[in-house]
Image: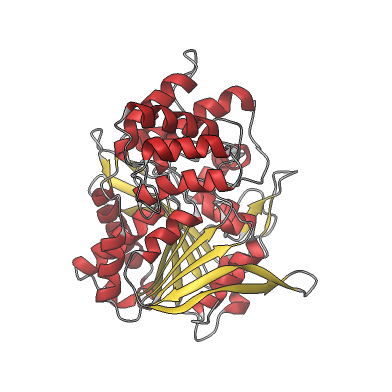
């Protein structure tokens, strides 16, 4: 009897030719993390298919079922009917895949301890324990090459998890072959400062306002302003204005050129935007953010929602709250949310720069390959802050920046983005993709993942 095997799934007439598993992993004495595991598509399996990709979504507080059902999993919701349909660019055609809802309190994951605490160290520790629990359940995976992956705040989750695996001298370290992170929040200050540059050079405010912002917030000699003079009143006011203009104007901050998909936009956008601001802002900018909240939160509204602005979470939320679905995937009855406000609002962010973790991983593991990729029209965790981060790691540049290409559905070669290669670390952009690259550019994301796994240049 195979534990947690999914034998039926509402919305599917026939189960696929590959197995899927769903259930709980022991992450501590009190914590259970929900996982969804998808075996590699049978026709793709050969002697070299010994790869396991483990995926985490960010937040902190958002569910990895977003990755599984909106981005790179085997099924997606039809945007018109809401039915499940096969994803032709599912990553389980290239590797076995495992999606983990983390930390406890997110999605179907839970903690029976009423005094649950959330921070980066606890998350890394519980994720290690959950992986150990998974490999005990499924020993055949314990010999496979491990690729840790994710998106957004997984820019913290994944490096801290990998660093913990190395530091604890876990047996998993020998199997850890790769790290790939999409639009990761790798460095708070670079990310926050680059939002200002991104906004100005994408036409979101004018030259006069930009010059004034730099004048009051920057040291005159700096080439790249980090807007660190926030304690001064002039800078505080100008920053507040700039953040307000960018985040509260009905723009889709996850994909600048995509429409807003969500419900009554005018009021709800203002309510929802603040946690996202907080998500990309270094803690020292709290004074700016608090001021922003006072200006944007209508007094009549209840608690802030963490569901990203301009995204439509209604289909996935409705589906995973169905009793027959919860029974089919072996979870306890739960009011499932795409993102947990409780986890997000109580999460203590300890790691504001993942550079030390990245360097430690590269030092410890000779044959690891790291891919940091960025959809280039995401404002929230943008490519520019990512490039600043990579450039300052001090790694040897092996391949200068160049374009990478894929063939479109007509067989024509198209530019897919740009990349540069350092010693065992590749930085890449994906042209025209937002925060969720596999959702926005599934063909390109698939090609990128395939080349990465095959150790081919982009």
Front residue of 217/430: it is 217
Placement of 259 over or under 377, stated as above or below: above
Between 198 and 368, the residue placed more toward the observer is: 198
* Image quadrant assignment for residue 108: top left
Q: Position of residue 227 (x, y in %)?
A: 37, 42
Q: Residue 322: tell me if it is visible.
A: no
196 to 149, vertically: above or below: above
Q: Is residue 243 above or below residue 119?
A: above
Q: Residue at x 80, y 71 (%)?
A: 410
Residue 168: x and y in percent read: 19, 66
Is 53 left, or right, of 15 in this rendering? left
Can you say which quadrant of the picture contains the N terminus? bottom left
Q: Is residue 293 above or below residue 73?
A: above
Q: Which quadrant of the figure has residue 155?
A: bottom left
Q: Toward the viewer: 362 or 210?
A: 210
Residue farthest toward the right in the current orientation of the protein: 410
Task: Report the residue at 37% width, 55% height from top.
Answer: 186
Outermost residue to the top: 300
Q: Return the x and y of residue 258 as percentages of the image width and height.
A: 66, 45
Quadrant of the rendered structure where residue 220 is?
top left
Counting the numbered discs, the total is 0
Q: Quadrant of the C terminus?
A: bottom right
Display coloring: secondary structure
Direction front: furthest residue: 220
Q: In this orientation, does residue 234 appear?
A: yes
Identify the residue at horizontal 50%, vertical 39% (top origin): 210
Classify residue 52 as left or right of residue 85. left
Question: Which residue of the protein is positioned furthest toward the bottom in this rendering?
Answer: 47
């Amino acid at each position: 009897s195979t534990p947690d095997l999914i034998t039926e799934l509402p919305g599917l007439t026939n189960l696929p030719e590959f197995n899927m598993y769903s259930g709980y992993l022991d992450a501590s004495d009190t914590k259970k993390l929900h996982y969804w595991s998808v075996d590699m598509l049978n026709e793709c399996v050969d002697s070299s298919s010994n790869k396991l990709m483990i995926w985490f979504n960010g937040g902190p507080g958002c569910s990895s079922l977003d990755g599984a059902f909106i981005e790179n999993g085997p099924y997606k919701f039809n945007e018109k009917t809401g039915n499940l349909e096969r994803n032709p660019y599912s990553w389980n055609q290239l590797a076995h895949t495992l999606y983990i809802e983390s930390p406890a309190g997110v999605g179907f994951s839970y903690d029976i301890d009423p005094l649950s605490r959330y921070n980066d160290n606890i998350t890394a520790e519980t994720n290690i324990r959950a992986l150990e629990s998974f490999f005990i359940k499924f020993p055949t995976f314990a010999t496979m090459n491990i690729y840790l992956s994710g998106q957004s705040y997984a820019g913290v989750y994944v490096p801290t998890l990998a660093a913990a695996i190395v530091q604890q001298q876990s047996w998993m370290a020998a199997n850890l072959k790769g790290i790939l992170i999409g639009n990761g929040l790798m460095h708070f200050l670079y990310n926050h400062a680059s939002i200002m540059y991104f906004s100005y050079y994408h036409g979101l405010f004018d030259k006069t306002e930009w010059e004034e912002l730099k004048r009051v917030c920057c040291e005159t000699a700096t080439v790249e302003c980090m807007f660190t003079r926030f304690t001064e009143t002039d800078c505080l006011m100008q920053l507040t204005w700039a953040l307000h203009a960018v985040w509260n104007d009905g723009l889709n901050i996850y994909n600048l050129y995509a429409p807003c998909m969500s419900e009554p936009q005018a009021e709800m956008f203002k309510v929802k935007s603040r946690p996202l601001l907080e998500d990309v802002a270094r803690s020292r900018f709290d004074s700016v953010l608090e001021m922003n909240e006072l200006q944007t939160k209508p007094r009549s509204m209840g608690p802030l929602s963490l569901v990203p602005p301009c995204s439509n979470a209604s289909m996935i939320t409705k589906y995973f709250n169905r009793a027959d679905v919860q029974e089919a995937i072996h979870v306890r009855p739960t009011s499932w949310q795409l993102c947990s406000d409780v986890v997000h609002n109580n999460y203590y962010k300890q790691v504001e720069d993942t550079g030390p973790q990245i360097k430690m991983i590269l030092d410890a593991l000779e044959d690891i390959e790291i891919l940091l990729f960025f959809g280039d029209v995401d404002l929230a965790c943008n490519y520019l802050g990512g490039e600043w981060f990579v450039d300052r790691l001090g790694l040897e540049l092996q391949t200068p920046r160049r374009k990478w290409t894929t063939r479109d559905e007509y067989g024509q070669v198209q530019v897919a983005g740009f990349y540069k290669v350092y010693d065992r670390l590749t930085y890449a952009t994906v042209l025209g993709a937002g925060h969720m690259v596999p959702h926005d550019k599934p063909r390109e994301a698939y090609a990128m993942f395939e080349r990465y796994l095959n150790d081919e240049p982009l």
